[in-house]
Amino acid sequence: MIFKKGDIVTVSNMFEEYMGTALILYKDEEKIDIKIIDEQTGLDVVPGEEILLKYENDNTIFAAYCNILKRLEESGALLLRVKKTFSVINRRFSTRYPAFFKVSISPLDSEQVFEGVIKNMSLRGFMVTTDAELSVNDLVKMGLEYDGRIVELKARIIRKSGQDGNYIYGLCIVDLGYDEKLLLRSIITELKEEKRKLSEKIIREYIGNDG
């Protein structure tokens, strides 16, 4: 099994650096059509260029190495040729969802505050972009802006990459309180519904353009 039409995947370059989030518009054994649905980070459409698509489902990550064929000007869709597919055990145990929330980040032992943006999230962690230079295993305080309030969280940095002058961090939430856990569940439920509506809208538009 691999992803299907309507699934939302992450897009990485050949070095597995994050480049964006995309919706699967069409898929068969040899070809996949996708559309980037968030801010693109260094995604150059070069025919023949190799990219990696990943999709998380329960405890498995499904992935495909693909070559870019071309971009459709009208719809903005990228047409890809499947090169290789594989799956691995997902050790996150929690599905991530595309998101866009402003967040403040501060090292646990410092009063210095940086701004960032949450690009995807789950009940266990986040992917955040920021210009703050931090280190793997650092503990940080986070202030998540949601529904007119600031949610205070603590997290540990477990991954780091740098790209285009910004840093991308994978963070795991630690010491999550009961109220914060309920709020995160509400946010995830909202993101699931947004994902469903967005997928339906884009696929309807793509089918219309294709026809």
Image (tube, helix red, strand yellow):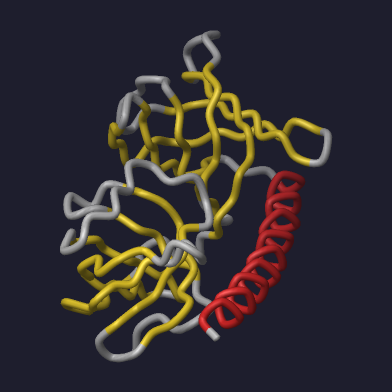
* Residue 134, picture quadrant: top left
* Residue 173 point in image, percent of width and height: 52, 43
Total marks drawn?
Answer: 0
* Residue 122 point in image, percent of width and height: 55, 56
Q: Which residue in the rendered view is the most extreme toward the right? A: 148
Q: Is residue 115 above or below residue 74?
A: above
Going by the image, does 211 lie left or right of 160? right
Can residue 99 be seen in this snapshot? yes
Q: Is residue 162 above or below residue 118?
A: above
Going by the image, does 82 lie left or right of 177? left
Q: Nearer the viewer, residue 130 or 68?
A: 68
Q: Which residue in the rendered view is the most extreme toward the top? A: 111
User: Which corner quadrant holds the C terminus?
Assistant: bottom right
Q: Nearer the viewer, residue 144 or 6?
A: 6
Residue drawn at the location 45% of the way across and 57% of the way down: 21
Residue drawn at the location 25% of the way across and 86% of the way down: 30
Residue drawn at the location 61% of the way across and 35% of the way down: 153
* Residue 66, picture quadrant: bottom left
Q: Is residue 96 above or below residue 168?
A: below
Can residue 94 be seen in this snapshot? no
* Residue 144 point in image, percent of width and height: 66, 34
User: Which corner quadrant holds the N terminus?
Assistant: bottom left
Q: Nearer the viewer, residue 13 or 80?
A: 80
Going by the image, does 58 lie left or right of 192? left
Residue drawn at the location 25% of the way across and 69% of the way down: 69
